[in-house]
Image: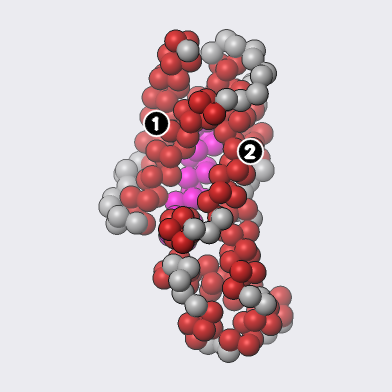
């Protein structure tokens, strides 16, 4: 097998392995599952830390669609349509066995996956959405985004992410029509946000 193909196969196996057993799983067990020796594993990934960083890159960053940021800020479309389109598409990426379980295991293990990804989301999604929400409420306010505003966006984001938790952690059914469910959540969020923002 070509080295690049072998590396990709090991990484793919590592993603599946850690999603199954959590990050307590060792490289010896991973190598056994992959049918290779531990020294061969370390030839491609010199330490477990290096391997975990590649797992993070593979699952959380390589699957990110840069077009999403453009969708969110395209004011030629109503904000509700933009948010709905983003979250419907985003949900297809995050509501997988590996994505949800690795994120939960990382938090329980105290890895930095969660903090890194949340910082990434703040820069690429949350702050942008807050600015778009201000405009949608008739405020051309470009002052720094406040934590209180981000918390409101978090409420919508977390509600959608929780659907994946329901499926892959609790083994409970998801809504039959996920796109419709997301559209309703976005609509509900926007109605509440405009009222709260006006009061604030």
Q: Is residue 53 above or below residue 89?
A: below
Q: Is residue 180 above or below residue 118?
A: above
Give the class, few, some or many, for how many residues have Cα within 10 Å of label 2's Cα (few <14, many ≥20): some
Asked which secondary structure carries label 1, the reply is helix
Principal secondary structure, stretch drawn in magenta = helix
**Residue 14: x, y in percent?**
54, 72
Residue 46 appears in view: yes
Which image quarter holds the N terminus?
A: bottom right
Asked which quadrant contains residue 100, the reply is bottom left
**Residue 2: x, y in percent?**
71, 82
Q: Earlier in the sequence, mark 2 or mark 1?
A: 2
Kindly identify which residue carries mark 1: 185
Magenta includes 122? no
Q: Are marks 2 and 1 in contact (CB under 8 Å)?
A: no
Left or right of 38 in this view: 176: left
Q: Is residue 50 above or below residue 184?
A: below
**Residue 88: x, y in percent?**
48, 39
Label annotation for residue 72: none
């Amino acid at each position: 097998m070509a080295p690049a193909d072998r590396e990709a196969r090991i990484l793919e196996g590592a993603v599946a392995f850690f999603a199954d057993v959590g990050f307590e799983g060792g490289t010896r067990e991973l190598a056994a599952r992959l049918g290779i020796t531990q020294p061969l594993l370390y030839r491609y990934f010199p330490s477990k830390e290096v391997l975990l960083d590649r797992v993070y890159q593979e699952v959380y960053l390589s699957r990110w669609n840069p077009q999403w940021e453009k969708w969110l800020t395209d004011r030629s479309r109503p904000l509700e349509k933009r948010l709905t389109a983003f979250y419907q598409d985003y949900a297809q990426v995050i509501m997988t066995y590996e994505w949800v379980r690795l994120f939960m295991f990382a938090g329980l293990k105290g890895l930095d996956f969660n903090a890194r990804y949340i910082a990434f989301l703040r820069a690429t999604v949350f702050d942008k959405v807050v600015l778009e929400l201000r405009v949608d409420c008739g405020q051309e306010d470009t002052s720094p985004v406040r934590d209180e505003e981000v918390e409101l966006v978090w409420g919508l984001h977390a509600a959608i992410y929780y659907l994946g938790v329901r499926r892959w952690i609790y083994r409970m059914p998801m809504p039959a029509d996920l796109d419709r469910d997301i559209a309703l959540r976005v609509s509900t969020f926007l109605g509440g946000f405009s009222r709260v923002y006006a009061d604030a």
